Image: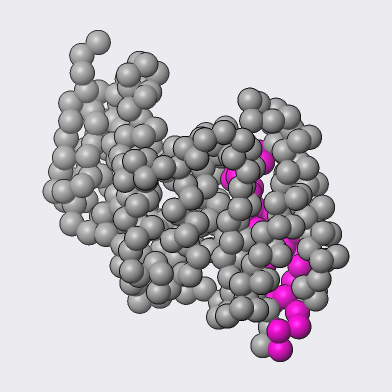
Amino acid sequence: MSEPEFLAPARLSEAARILAEHGTDARVLGGGTALLPLLRRRIATPRVLLGLRRIPGIAEVNHHFSGLRIGAQATLRTLETASAVGGLIPGLGDALARIGVVRIRNQATVGGTLACGDPRLDLPALLAVLDADLRLVSTRGERTIGFGDLYAGDGATAIRPDELIVDVHVPFQPAGSALVHLKYLPGTEGGYPTVGVAVRLGLDEAGERIADARLALVGAGPATVVAPAAQDGLLGARPTGEVFAEAAAAVRDEIAPETDSLGTAEYKRAMAEVFTRRALTEALARVRAD
């Protein structure tokens, strides 16, 4: 089988045209951390590889009029170290610094990480609790989708074959809220977690009740899992250990993990409950410290 042709257009419209013309015979090449192993093993056999780095602004991270704009070709390391991230979303840089190892973060792109649909990856859960959305472009126009509508499970996403991820928008976060991401790694730093939990938590002005709560889990099902029942149970409640324990128990009931080399389904449920409680407790401590 012949090697795929590499195309690197300098305009977004040209990239969209190439993708529309070649359809499933074309694959977008970002950092290659997910795609290159598939190419080497002949699991993926595209005729065209589409590079986007020449398109202006597509690898930048900067302030947007309503929050943070993350170009799809920005690497995880670029996002981790961007000054705009620390200024707008405290805690995100620290969470990103615990994803894999530096070598991977220097290579993996935001768009590629999101498009591959792997439920074991941390970034989708972080962006889900931050209420981020994606802007997609094709020759038919552009559309925006939220993370709640992105993943269908088993590696499938709502991204159509002729669509490109252009950027991710993270809105300004509720005042006084805190972001926490905890995970259990049974192996090396660069490995997948058995389970991970991302939490955004905020209190009312009096500091007595929970006014904001978002939860998302990694490794808890065939896609990144958002836990609406647990979130609803937190809102308006007093931030006590008992309330956090009830929310963690609700998370256990909402997820559908699968048994694999990282643990049995029942073990993952138990770990999700433990780490949800820990993440909520740490988020509360950060809110009160600020």
Position of residue 174 relative to residue 43, above or below, is below
Q: Position of residue 134 (x, y in %)?
A: 42, 56
Position of residue 269 relative to residue 48, above or below, is below
Residue lying at 76% horizontally and 49% vertically, measured from the top left: 273
Q: Position of residue 59 (x, y in %)?
A: 26, 54
Which of the pair 55/161 is nearer the observer?
55
Q: Is residue 237 left or right of residue 218?
A: right
Position of residue 12 relative to residue 83, above or below, is above
Q: Is residue 9 left or right of residue 276?
A: left
Residue lying at 64% horizontally and 67% vertically, measured from the top left: 283
Q: Is residue 105 left or right of residue 278?
A: left
Report if residue 251 lies within the magenta region.
Answer: no
Q: Which range is magenta?
A: 206-235
Which of the pair 190/142 is nearer the observer?
190
Residue lying at 37% horizontally and 45% vertically, measured from the top left: 102
Seen as rendered, the residue at the extreme bottom is 206
Seen as rendered, the residue at the extreme front is 188
Q: Quadrant of residue 206?
A: bottom right
